Image (cartoon, rainbow, N blue to C red):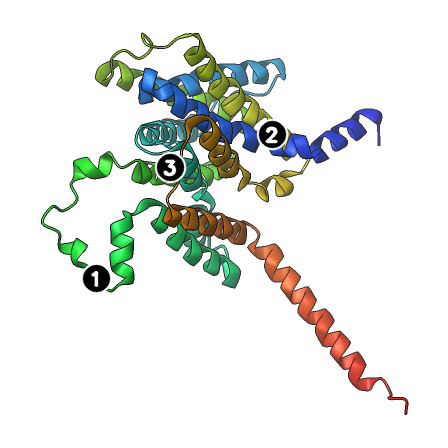
Amino acid sequence: MTQSNLQQDNLAKSPLFLVAPFFFLGTSMVVMKAVIPNTTPLFLAGFRLVPAGIIVLLLTIALKLPQPKTWKAWFWIALFSLIDGAMFQGFLTEGLVSTGAGLGAVLIDAQPLVVAVLCRLLFGDVIGLWGWLGLAIGLIGISLCGLPAEWILSSLHGNFSFLHSSTPLSWDGLLHSGELLMLLAALSMSFGTIIIRYVKQHVDAIVATGWHMLLGGIPLFLLSGLWESQQWSRLDLSGWGGLGYATLFGTALTYGIFFYLASVGNLTSVSALIFLTPVFAMLFSYFFLAEVLTPLQWIGVVLTLISVVLVIQREKIASGISALSTRLSAATRAAEVTPKVD
């Protein structure tokens, strides 16, 4: 192994390097929550995408990566841009208006649960016992995080009168539910994860990512211009700094680290650490934004994080238990045939 390859291998195994993208993602949620009262959600979403996309595309040009040429490549990039770019970031920033950064990060982190179900339906992927258990726990956890506490407590006492309330949920009320918007963001990101499988068949993944951020941010800016006002007039120096942090560190640098780890084959270690994003978000939102969760939400957070670990690591858990069972069986057989000494 050359000195350069050895340095790359050491970097990819560095705990700080592995944790960095989740730190940037989690703290970006906190920064955006702090900035959003002085700007508008769609402008914030567009600003997070477009500059980051330009940076990534300039990097692809410097690396001389091939740009998309066929109509199929541009079709999948456009679809990826709409769903994983515009819709994901739009729902996320709109959701941040009425929910906390920590709780929002937990709900976004439920994305692997949706991906597991979609892959089962579309590709026949095996979920397995531990995966299904994780999905069940995740459903309970997300419900505890997002549903009104009075609904949950009434249900535990067998009282479902809220389903026949004289003031039913309205579309306007649903669209202003921060928790629901965060789940829609997670759903968009899940479909984006599926779509990237097809994107990579026609164009380099890094190139597609740059274009998807650039093209996904443009409609957000257009919608912001039509529907929003005072997008930046109330921003001070710290506000612009927050936007810059969410763009450079929370988007461009995070994607760069992910692709670097993918290139050296270390994404398995990264996937095992995905739960760190809401952990960082909750920690920093508590200290800097004084966000406090209810006891039911805390239970929901713990259950959701457990479910994500179970779903992501389901194959390792199953193989580990199978190996342990084999060893115990072998040890039992060995004990049965070992002659006893009087």
Identity, as a three-letter code, of the amino acid under mark 1: Asn
Q: Which residue is disc 2 drawn over?
A: 20
Closer to the camera, 105 or 236? 236
Q: Position of residue 43 (x, y in %)?
A: 34, 17
Q: Position of residue 223 (x, y in %)?
A: 27, 19
Please say whether residue 27 is visible from this viewpoint: yes
Pick the front one: 40 or 269: 40
Q: What residue would you read off at disc 1?
A: 159
How many C-alpha atoms fall within 10 Å of the one at disc 1: few (<14), some, or many (≥20)? few
Residue, x 55% and y 33% (percent of image)?
A: 22
- The answer to whether the residue labelled 1 contacts the one labelled 3, judged by CB atoms less than 8 Å apart, is no
342 relative to 302 in the view: left or right = right
Three-letter code, disc 3: Ser
The mark that comes first in sequence, 2 or 1, is 2
Which badge, 2 or 3, comes first in the chain's sequence?
A: 2
**In the image, residue 143 above or below residue 204:** below
Q: Secondary structure at mark 1?
A: loop
Residue to which mark 3 is pinned: 188
The residue lying at 66 percent from left, 30 percent from top is: 17
| Whether label 2 touches label 1, CB < 8 Å | no
Crowding at mark 3 (Cα within 10 Å: few <14, some 14-19, many 20+): many
Q: Quadrant of the C terminus?
A: bottom right
Q: Nearer the viewer, mark 2 or mark 3?
A: 2
The image shows residue 97, relative to residue 272, as above or below, that is above
Sequence order check, earlier mark of 1 and 3: 1
Give the Cα separation between the discs numbered 2 and 3: 24 Å
Alpha carbons under labels 2 and 1: distance apart: 46 Å
Write down the quadrant of residue 323 in the picture.
bottom right
